[in-house]
């Protein structure tokens, strides 16, 4: 997800953060048991979460 798309969903930030953290957990579990085929998805979700946290921090400071 692009930063501009995340900015548009400002009212849903808490929900998105929770969903992405849960998804990272589930994907990591599947990856550890070798059941995950698209391992790049973990990296994508982590990046999205980092973008969201960065935008939230900018709002607090800015």
Image: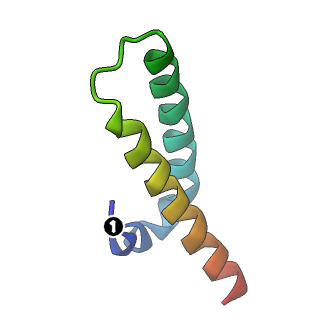
Q: Residue furthest right?
A: 61
Q: Residues within 10 Å of mark 1 (few under 14, many from 20)?
A: few
- Please give the residue where the numbered disc 1 appears in the rendered image: 2
Q: Is residue 32 above or below residue 61?
A: above
Q: Secondary structure at mark 1?
A: loop
x and y percentages locating residue 15 in the rendered image:
53, 49
**Which residue occupies 33% across, 69% down?**
5
Q: How is the image coloured?
A: rainbow
Residue lying at 66% horizontally and 74% vertically, measured from the top left: 57
Foreground of the two, 34 or 58: 34
In the displayed structure image, the side of residue 45 where residue 50 appears, left or right: right
Q: How many numbered dots are placed on residues in this image?
A: 1
- Which residue is outermost to the bottom? 62
Q: Looking at the picture, how far across and down is residue 61, in whole percent?
A: 71, 85
Image quarter hosting the N terminus? bottom left
Report x, y in % for residue 9: 42, 66
Figure quadrant of the C terminus: bottom right
Tell whether 58 sits left or right of 28. Answer: right
Vertical position of residue 36 compared to residue 43: above or below: above
Residue 25 horizontal/vertical position (percent): 55, 28
| 56, above or below 48, in the image | below
Residue under the point 62% across and 81% down: 59
State the image quarter where residue 6 is shown.
bottom left
Q: Is residue 42 above or below residue 10?
A: above
- The image quadrant of residue 22 is top right
Residue drawn at the location 52% of the way across and 18% of the way down: 29
* 38 and 17: which is toward the camera: 38
């Amino acid at each position: 997800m692009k930063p501009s798309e995340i900015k548009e969903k400002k009212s849903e930030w808490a929900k998105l953060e929770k969903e992405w953290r849960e998804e990272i957990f589930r994907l990591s579990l599947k990856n550890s048991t070798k059941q995950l085929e698209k391992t790049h998805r973990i990296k994508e979700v982590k990046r999205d979460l980092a973008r969201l946290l960065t935008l939230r921090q900018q709002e607090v400071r800015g």
